[in-house]
Image (cartoon, rainbow, N blue to C red):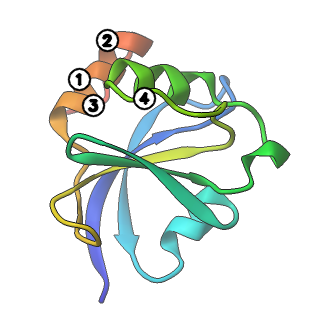
């Protein structure tokens, strides 16, 4: 089943901007963004999808700060691009939650929502 939702994308490289991106979710969409096998960190109403073998990519300081400020303490350093989506039930992804987008706007001093 394919469906579209708006994801909050936090690239590891600081030269690349944090942005919102429409994403058609299918069996391989998250793997394409994460550039490999994916894992996730869950918060209240959201998930951050990450490369499961992140040690091979750049540390993602912005995603780590956003995850911490959203109330979750990561076990390890975050690496690679992080893709934030909302979720209702396991396996039911939705648009990135507004409170997470607002937090990212405040932390990174950049407007994301139109």
Q: Position of residue 114 (x, y in %)?
A: 20, 33
In the displayed structure, would residue 75 be above or below residue 36? Answer: above
Q: How many marks?
A: 4
Q: CA distance from mark 4 to mark 2?
A: 14 Å
Which residue is painted at 29% across and 72% down in the image? 91
In the displayed structure, would residue 109 be above or below residue 30? Answer: above
Mark 3 vs 1: CB contact within 8 A:
yes
The disc at residue 87 is none
Disc 1 crowd rating (10 Å Cα; few below 14, some 14-19, many 20+) is some
Q: Position of residue 18 (x, y in %)?
A: 48, 31
Helix, strand or loop at mark 2: helix
Mark 2 vs 1: CB contact within 8 A:
yes
In the displayed structure, would residue 58 be above or below residue 37? Answer: above
Front-most of residues 73 and 40:
73
User: For mark 2, what is the residue?
Assistant: 106
Q: CA distance from mark 2 to mark 1?
A: 6 Å
Front-most of residues 68 and 104:
68
Nearest to N terminus: mark 3 or mark 4: 4
Disc 3 crowd rating (10 Å Cα; few below 14, some 14-19, many 20+) is many
Which residue is painted at 66% across and 57% down in the image? 52
Which residue is painted at 66% across and 67% down in the image? 37
User: For mark 3, what is the residue?
Assistant: 101
Front-most of residues 93 and 95:
93
Nearest to N terminus: mark 4 or mark 1: 4
Mark 2 vs 3: CB contact within 8 A:
no
The disc at residue 67 is 4
Q: Position of residue 46 (x, y in %)?
A: 28, 46
User: For mark 1, what is the residue?
Assistant: 102
**Lateral position of residue 100 relative to residue 63, left or right:** left
Mark 3 vs 4: CB contact within 8 A:
no
Front-most of residues 1 and 50:
50
Indicate the quadrant where residue 16 lies.
Answer: top right
């Amino acid at each position: 089943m394919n469906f579209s939702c708006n994801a909050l994308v936090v690239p590891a490289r600081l030269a690349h901007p944090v942005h919102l991106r429409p994403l058609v979710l299918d069996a391989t969409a998250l793997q394409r963004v994460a550039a490999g096998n994916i894992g996730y960190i869950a918060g209240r109403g959201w998930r951050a999808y990450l490369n499961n073998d992140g040690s091979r990519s750049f540390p993602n300081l912005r995603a780590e700060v956003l995850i911490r400020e959203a109330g979750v303490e990561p076990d390890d350093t975050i690496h690679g691009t992080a893709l934030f989506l909302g979720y209702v039930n396991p396996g039911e992804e939705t648009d990135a939650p507004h409170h997470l987008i607002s937090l990212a706007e405040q932390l990174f001093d950049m407007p994301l929502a139109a």
